[in-house]
Amino acid sequence: MNKQASFLCDAVGTTVTVYIRGEIDHHTAVSIRNGIDGVLFEKRPEKLILDLSGVSFMDSSGLGLIMGRLSVMKSLGGEMTLQQPSRETRTMLQLAGMERLLSIVYTDEIHEKQQIKAKKAYIPPKAESVPCRQASREKSKTGSGKRRTGAPKTTA
């Protein structure tokens, strides 16, 4: 893997947009994190947008980077959005359940439908009302009307 990664911060008003390019792994996440945090604590934005369209690879360190920036933004009283995640990062984000934690903006039609679907609450289908059956007492060969259970009784 190419261990190259870069980012560019763009601050406009109360919004900071960070464009990340390359691979996010445990080698590159530290420098990206330190750079973004420096901008966040200096600018104290109301909104952070991480543009992931240029990310070619992301492992769990990338998820940690995202979750850490979400935590920083919450501590600053702001919000965070992921923007245009690349195809290489979408599966990782979906498997991690990131749609439940923050807004992810997709630009293509397929993932736009997935975003709409993820926002809808899950409504389970209605269960059919089925009355409980009582155990029927079948007559045994002796005709006593009782069911035999367990070991036969022995008399002494």
Image: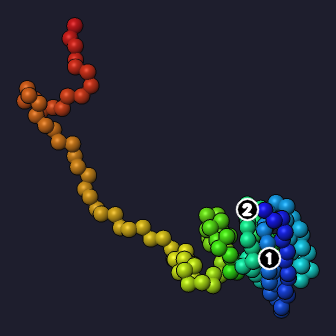
**151 lies above or below 29:** above
User: Looking at the image, which residue is at 75% across and 77% down?
Assistant: 54
Q: Mark 2: give few (<14), some (14-19) or many (20+) Cα within 10 Å.
A: some
User: Looking at the image, which residue is at 85% across and 87% down?
Assistant: 11
Residue 102 image position (x, y, % from top left) = 67, 74
Quarter-of-image position of residue 85:
bottom right
Residue 21 image position (x, y, % from top left) = 79, 76
Instruction: Judge by depth and name the residue closer to the eye, 93 or 88.
Output: 88
Residue 105 image position (x, y, % from top left) = 65, 81
Q: Which of marks 2 and 1 is nearer the N terminus?
A: 1
**81 lies above or below 11:** above
Residue 97 image position (x, y, % from top left) = 62, 66
Asked if residue 44 can be seen in this view, the reply is no
Q: Which amino acid does label 1 sit on?
A: Ile
Which SS class for mark 2? loop
Q: Is residue 21 left or right of residue 106?
A: right
Q: Which amino acid does label 2 sit on?
A: Asp
Q: Mark 1 points at which residue?
A: 20
Q: In this view, does 1 lie to the left or right of 128?
A: right
Quarter-of-image position of residue 101:
bottom right
Quarter-of-image position of residue 143:
top left
Q: Mark 2 points at which residue?
A: 59
User: Looking at the image, which residue is at 17% across and 42% down?
Assistant: 136
Instruction: Judge by depth and name the residue closer to the eye, 91 or 47.
Output: 91
Which SS class for mark 1? strand
Q: In this view, does 106 lie to the left or right of 118?
A: right
Judged from this view, the residue extending furthest toward the bottom is 13
Asked if residue 12 can be seen in this view, the reply is yes
User: Looking at the image, which residue is at 75% across and 69% down?
Assistant: 66
Quarter of the image with the N terminus is bottom right
Circle 2/circle 1 CB separation < 8 Å: no
